[in-house]
Amino acid sequence: MNFRDLLRVVWSNLNRMRGRAIMTALGVVIGTAAIVVLIALASGLQESATGDATAFGPVNQITLLPGAFFRAFGAPSGGDESVLTPDIIKEIGRREGVTAITPKEQVAAPTTIKLNRLVGSGTLTGIDPLVVRDMGLEVERGADILGNWTVIVGAKVGESFVDPRERSGTQVQRNGSEEPLDLLGQTLSVSITKLGDDGKPITRTVRLRVGGVLEETGSDDYAIYMALADAEDLTSWYSGQRPDRRNDGYSQAVVVVDDTQQLLPIQRELEDDGFFAFSAQSTLQQINILFAVIQAVFGGIGAIALLVAAIGIANTMIMSILERTREIGLMKAVGATNRDVMSIFIAEAGAIGFFGGIAGVLFGIGAAKVIDVIAQAYINAQLASSGSTSSDPISIAIIPIWLPIFAIVFSLIIGLASGIYPALRAVQLDPVNALKYE
Amino acid sequence: MAPDTLIRIQGIKRHFILGDSVVKALDGVDLDIEQGEMMCLMGPSGSGKSTLMNLLGGLDTPDEGTIVVGGRDISALDENELALYRRQMVGFVFQSFNLIPTMTALENVSFPLIFSGTAPAERKARGEELLDMVGLADRMDHKPTELSGGQQQRVAMARALANDPQILLGDEPTGNLDSKTGVEVMEMLRKLNEQGQTIVLVTHDPRVSQYTTRSIHMLDGRIIEEELAPL
């Protein structure tokens, strides 16, 4: 019996029990549609969480914290080496695949940042002036040079400046324009106040010249980058002593790698050295693992529905075999082999799964689209009521290209598998008795 | 073996276990069937005639003994080989016709050819030819429910001939028919036999034996009498 004849026979048999076949296939339709919708939702979530990969920071950088940070969370001791002393930083900088490394120290003091009468905010962060370019700090305007109290500010630091005499929270509107404040070339005054030895407050004020403004990155838009020495100067003054970096190390360092493909191995090596390391890549990787699990769980829920459908198919096929007992006897009498009989019944069950799967995928895609439209309308309404507009349309349900194919193949396999037991029963029928069956 | 012997049955036993008792459906049967013969197996219910026919048709295998058909012992074949044997060597006609209700007469007749891998066009041609032969050329597209009992049995006979079998087996082929259509069917079988078709019938209708060249009478799983038709 060739494949075309098999399909012909199967088609005519399904046609004969059309009503029952459709009812049985409905179970598959629901199961497949559930799989499609649930995985589409999980994919949509994943996409909205990880779609803008740059929001997690530059893909070629690893942030290092000393092992002590690690141990604070109860992790096993990282050993003595896991301190970010200048020597160790130098050593890491010489490792293969490492382009550059810099300590990264935030000014450890309460500061007030002012521009004339405006008050703003920003994270004063000291880095090695030599690695500005290697760190990928792209200056939109101005120069990428640090040092001597010249700083580079993040794209949104300008927006943070407000006039304290106006209503709180109102953004500065100079000359009636909506343009955010352009800090390039301005001089910011940064004040630090501490209690002196006599118990009276003393204030130190330094002037920072803004030499450059960074492009918007999503990760360091509120940073004010300054030379490490300048930042250390402020911290020392506030604490009254110079931090002992040779022994205590820096609190943080940023490693830049040559090849983003090699980042994770380098990160692992640093972790093995006892550092606490994280990167946009490893964060993304972990989030993706999490979403893979969510997809599997959601898919599993749909698969349960499909499993129930499979039992339905098996049931329908067993019924059909009982009804067609004489016909099976006849098939055997006219020379059908066990393989022929087996193929016919497995193929019938497979066809129910296959057509159910196709309908389920179409139905599931439709349902996913409807959910998407409703959810977007809801999100837009929420955004509108909070006064902002969405920059990009957010997709709640995304259907990856593999999903419909996977769903149809899966339901076909489920159908074929649920046909095995009924087909075996058909094969085992004794032709003599089957032909006499009433 | 005589040159014309198509089937040689020797020492056949077939026992069925029913609860605690053993039913000796066949209890040592020897029989030769000649090429071109039209014979009938007669006897009361339980005499073993149907069991013998099932063994001849390769639907069942004996517990003991050999059945040599065309030089080949079919009692030792496995299920697959038996399926091929049925496909190539045997055509069945049943008391209750056993037509597939959703198929037309033509589809029913060409149905066995699906399993022998015959191309669709050839299947159709062969089906038409056979239906024409049994006088149903104008009923090809009718479903079994649209045909009379006699017509249905003629469709079944056409189907039995689809693979050009060596042996045509009939299990009470006239059992469900009134006497007039029964006669029609028997006439048709006789015509086939005259064309050289070997036919074995199972019946307990004495009128059937009037058409056959030889009658075998069975009782309790044994052959008790053999009578040749008057020439």
Image (spheres, rainbow, N blue to C red):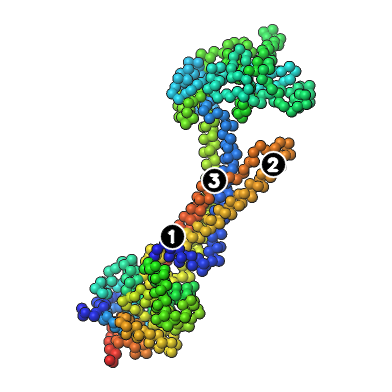
In the figure, B114 relative to B202: above or below? Answer: above
Residue at x 47% of width, y 20% of height: A93
Q: Which amino acid, by three-letter code, is at mark 3?
A: Pro
Q: Which residue is mark 3?
A: A400
Q: Nearer the viewer, residue B22 or A10?
A: A10
The N terminus of chain A lies in which quarter of the figure? bottom left
In the figure, B216 relative to A2: above or below? Answer: below
> Can you tell which quarter of the image residue A29 is in?
bottom right
Residue at x 39% of width, y 67% of height: B119
Q: Which residue is mark 2?
A: A380
| Cα separation between marks 1 and 2 | 50 Å
Please tell me the numbered disc located at residue A317: none
Give how far across and how far down residue A11 sits, in percent. 48, 65
Q: Is residue B141 visible?
A: yes
Q: Earlier in the sequence, mark 1 or mark 3?
A: 3
**Discs 1 and 2 carry the same chain letter:** yes
Q: Earlier in the sequence, mark 1 or mark 2?
A: 2
Is residue A87 shown left or right of residue A227? left
Q: Chain of mark 2?
A: A
Residue at x 45% of width, y 20% of height: A94
Q: Residue furthest bottom?
A: B230
Residue at x 74% of width, y 28% of height: A178
